[in-house]
């Protein structure tokens, strides 16, 4: 401890002896013509530090405060721009290209005020944005972008360590993710197949510049989503020098490099490796996860009017069980909980990658975009009865692969009367393979699945969006449409059956007040596990009658912006669902599944499930001002799906009440503190069928309780609260910047009771038989809780 204190004192003294200022350079261009713009006014946002671009559009700022900064650019005839955030250190001067948008209303004078919140005619409401500083310093987020999104209104989260994104009562499978415009199907390590949740995000925050989050009013060029579209924009490497960032945290370590590859080409590369298996073994957890990931982006300015972006992202995951976890353990309840997990959780491994290229050409009156990508995901799981690996004990041997190749073309242009168009098409080929042996049990008894499946698809779509502002820019109108199809069956092959229109309106009532509405119909393809399911006689059973899932959105809201760094919004929403896959085996909608590990949809279904989600959201947000920032959101949401009798009942995502308050303050001497409070209403759950669970044949297959789906979601967990705190200290040295942080998730160790486990009573001879019925075990309930204080310490070094 003494050595650590001496080290901190030395760092502080070195910082005090050197200047606390850095620099930013760059150029200013017209966003359409790509011509340089001379004599543009440049300011460090929030300060009086400024300059003017030279005749070549270039600028250089000195005396810039160290840390994250935004740049403001203003010029007659153009909209004032406030850039994203850029990290300035003593040894790292960011290079920025500022793209100004022409604005005929600004021909007489420069408008120096610009909003800090993203505004869009296409999506005037249900759109939120995050900057890199908000991502990195979010309390409890551990620099995981998906955990940070949980601060937004309408977003529910499960207690514990999973990254499930639950938007306005929609299932975790209803979200789509894009990285620099390229779709990324696998976003989490150990991701649930058929959904999107998992424990740790694959995206490395070190490469992310900002995140745009749409919970409705999706742009027409983004399809196959029902609840949200999440867009990640990556940083551009420094064109002048090689930079390095090293990170060491409680769960993983990583390195990020960025710099020039040539005169007009830059790169960024990151790699991370976890060491959770050592930590989990040390604290005696029954599972041992290991993961690694990589991320690459290359950006090249091919000419004044064309640019190329290359993206690669991938991960390798291995999940083992800790068979020695109970060695030396004396607490009986802990031993029993460990046994449930050991006996039910399979040995799992996954690997995936996404690679893509985006080419953009700026013609005189339009912009052409071509996107090519390929992604692949392999998922393997094996489980033996009581973990004794002999053929007779095999319960699960599952191996599947999803491969997609995608092409998307877009043409964006503006007419002489200021109408914006975006038109395009997409074409995809896909292959799904599945080798599956599985024993499963429900209230009707044991079922054995044993099949090999291989199927190829061709998917296609066209889309368009047209937007314009009227009445002196007060009224914004945007209409979009999509039509999608797949050669799976006659119903889904016809794109007119999936015609997806959407309309957004916004009107500036007064200077600071805006009212907005949107209505849209959205479609999503059922998961490959559903499309590729084969029954035991070798038939693709779901082909007959399967349809795209449909969701109709109706949203209206009011926005008040007292100043350019603050906003208050109120939104009401309604989502109606049709054609959701309905499990023939269990007689429930698949909309209720996705909150746990495993596979969803690998079964016979019918497209007959209907549901609805509705509620309202209230948001108050303050962007960083004088070092203070915060966001508070409350959501009331109901999510209901029809049961087998056609009656609406609460879905798994019916949390009712969601409250999140996040606040932070930048202090003197480069200290920063932040806190986040979350309240999540208890979600419904289904009680056990105790009669079916106690049967030996059933329990020896399921190794856990069998749910009574005739009582679907009739029980409810308690409301859960959690407080997270993060403290950062940064030292800006001459050749490096060092950020030391302490991030404590659930600081007061709030415990959330979950559905209890069912475990057979054991004696010295093993599982105890019911003395009144030799075909049954005697079962006992074991308490299940989630939620413990999770302190994380990390170091980030930039040099």
Image (tube, rainbow, N blue to C red):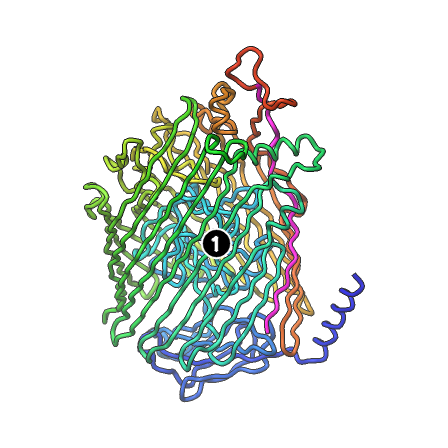
**Magenta segment, which residues?**
778-799
Pick the residue in front: 256 or 518.
Answer: 256
Report the side of 478 relative to 695 (left or right). Answer: left
Q: Nearer the viewer, residue 149 or 613?
A: 149
**Going by the image, does 327 lie left or right of 413?**
right
Q: Is residue 352 above or below residue 233?
A: above
Q: Secondary structure at mark 1?
A: strand
Q: Please identify the quadrant where the C terminus is shown.
A: bottom right
**Most foreground residue, 506 or 501:** 501
Q: Quadrant of residue 23?
A: bottom right
Q: Quadrant of residue 386?
A: top right
- Tell me residue 34's x, y (percent): 34, 78
Quadrant of the rendered structure where residue 118 is? bottom left
Against 56, is 595 above or below? above
Image location of residue 463, percent across then percent down: 25, 56
Q: Nearer the viewer, residue 298 or 648?
A: 298
Residue 229 shows in the view: no
- Is 782 part of what is drawn in magenta? yes
Q: Main secondary structure of the magenta part?
A: strand
> Would residue 529 be counted in the magenta stretch?
no
Residue, disc 1: 316
């Amino acid at each position: 401890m003494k050595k650590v204190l001496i080290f901190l004192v030395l760092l502080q003294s070195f910082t005090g002896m050197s200047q606390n200022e850095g620099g930013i350079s760059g150029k200013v261009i017209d966003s359409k013509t790509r011509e340089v713009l001379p004599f543009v006014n440049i300011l460090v946002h929030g300060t009086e530090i400024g300059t003017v671009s030279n005749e070549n559009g270039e600028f250089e700022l000195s005396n810039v405060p160290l840390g994250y900064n935004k740049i403001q650019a203003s010029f007659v005839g153009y909209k004032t721009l406030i850039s994203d955030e850029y990290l300035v250190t003593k040894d790292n001067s960011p290079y920025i290209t500022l793209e100004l948008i022409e604005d005929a209303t600004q021909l007489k004078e420069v408008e120096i005020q610009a909003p800090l919140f993203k505004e869009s005619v296409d999506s005037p409401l249900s759109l939120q944005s995050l900057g890199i500083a908000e991502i990195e310093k979010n309390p409890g987020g551990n620099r995981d972008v998906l955990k940070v999104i949980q601060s937004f209104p309408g977003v529910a989260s499960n207690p514990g360590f999973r990254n499930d994104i639950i938007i306005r009562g929609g299932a975790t499978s209803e979200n789509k993710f894009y990285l620099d415009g390229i779709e990324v199907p696998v976003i989490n390590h150990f991701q649930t197949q058929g959904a999107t949740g998992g424990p740790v995000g694959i995206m490395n925050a070190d490469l992310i510049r900002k995140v745009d989050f749409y919970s409705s009013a999706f742009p027409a060029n983004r399809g196959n989503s029902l609840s949200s579209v999440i867009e990640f924009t990556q940083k551009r490497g420094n064109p002048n020098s090689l930079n390095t960032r090293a990170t060491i945290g409680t769960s993983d370590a990583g390195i990020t490099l960025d710099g020039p590859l040539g005169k007009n080409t830059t790169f960024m590369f990151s790699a991370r490796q976890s060491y959770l298996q050592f930590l989990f073994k040390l604290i005696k957890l029954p599972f041992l996860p290991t993961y690694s990931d990589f991320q690459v982006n290359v950006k090249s300015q091919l000419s004044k009017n064309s640019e190329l972006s290359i993206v690669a992202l991938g991960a390798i995951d291995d999940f083992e069980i800790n068979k020695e976890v109970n060695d030396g353990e004396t607490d009986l309840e802990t031993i029993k909980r460990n046994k449930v997990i050991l006996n039910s959780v399979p040995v799992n491994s996954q690997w995936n990658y996404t690679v893509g290229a985006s080419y953009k050409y700026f013609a005189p009156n339009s912009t052409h975009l071509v996107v090519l990508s390929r992604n692949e995901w392999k998922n393997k799981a094996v489980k033996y009865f009581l973990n004794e690996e002999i053929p007779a004990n095999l319960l699960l041997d599952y191996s599947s692969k999803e491969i997609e190749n995608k092409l998307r073309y877009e043409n964006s242009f503006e007419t002489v009367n200021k109408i914006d168009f975006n038109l395009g098409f997409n074409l995809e080929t896909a292959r799904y393979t599945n080798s599956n042996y599985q024993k499963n049990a429900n209230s009707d008894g044991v079922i054995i699945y044993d099949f090999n499946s291989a199927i190829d698809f061709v998917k296609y779509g066209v889309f368009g969006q047209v937007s314009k502002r009227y009445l002196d820019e007060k009224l914004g109108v945007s209409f979009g449409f999509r039509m999608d199809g797949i050669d799976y069956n006659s119903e889904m092959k016809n794109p007119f059956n999936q015609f997806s229109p959407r309309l957004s309106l916004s009107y500036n009532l007064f200077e600071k007040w805006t009212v907005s509405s949107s209505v849209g119909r959205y479609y999503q393809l059922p998961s490959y596990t559903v499309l590729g399911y084969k029954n035991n006689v070798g038939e693709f059973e779901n082909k007959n009658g399967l349809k795209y899932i449909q969701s109709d959105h109706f949203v209206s809201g009011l926005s008040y912006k007292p100043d350019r760094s603050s906003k208050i919004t109120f939104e009401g929403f309604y989502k109606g669902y049709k054609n959701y896959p309905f499990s023939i085996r269990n007689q429930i909608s698949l909309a209720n599944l996705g909150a746990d590990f495993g596979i969803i949809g690998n079964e016979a279904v019918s497209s007959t499930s209907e549901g609805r989600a509705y509620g309202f959201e209230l948001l108050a947000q303050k962007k960083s001002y004088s070092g203070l920032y915060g966001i508070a959101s409350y959501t009331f949401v109901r999510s209901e799906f029809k049961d087998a009798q056609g009656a609406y009942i609460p879905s798994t995502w019916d949390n009712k009440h969601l409250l999140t308050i996040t606040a932070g303050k930048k202090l003197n001497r480069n200290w920063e503190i932040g806190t986040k409070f979350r309240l999540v209403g208890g979600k419904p759950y289904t009680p056990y069928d105790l009669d079916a669970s106690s049967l030996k044949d059933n329990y020896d297959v399921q190794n856990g309780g069998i749910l009574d789906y005739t009582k679907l979601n009739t029980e409810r967990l308690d409301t859960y609260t959690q407080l997270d705190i993060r403290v950062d200290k940064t030292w800006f040295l001459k050749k490096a910047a060092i950020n030391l942080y302490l991030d404590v998730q659930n600081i007061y160790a709030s415990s959330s009771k979950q559905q209890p486990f069912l475990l057979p009573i054991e004696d010295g001879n093993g599982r105890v038989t019911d003395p009144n019925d030799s075909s049954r075990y005697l079962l006992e309930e074991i308490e299940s809780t989630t939620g413990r204080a999770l302190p994380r310490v990390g170091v980030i070094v930039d040099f």
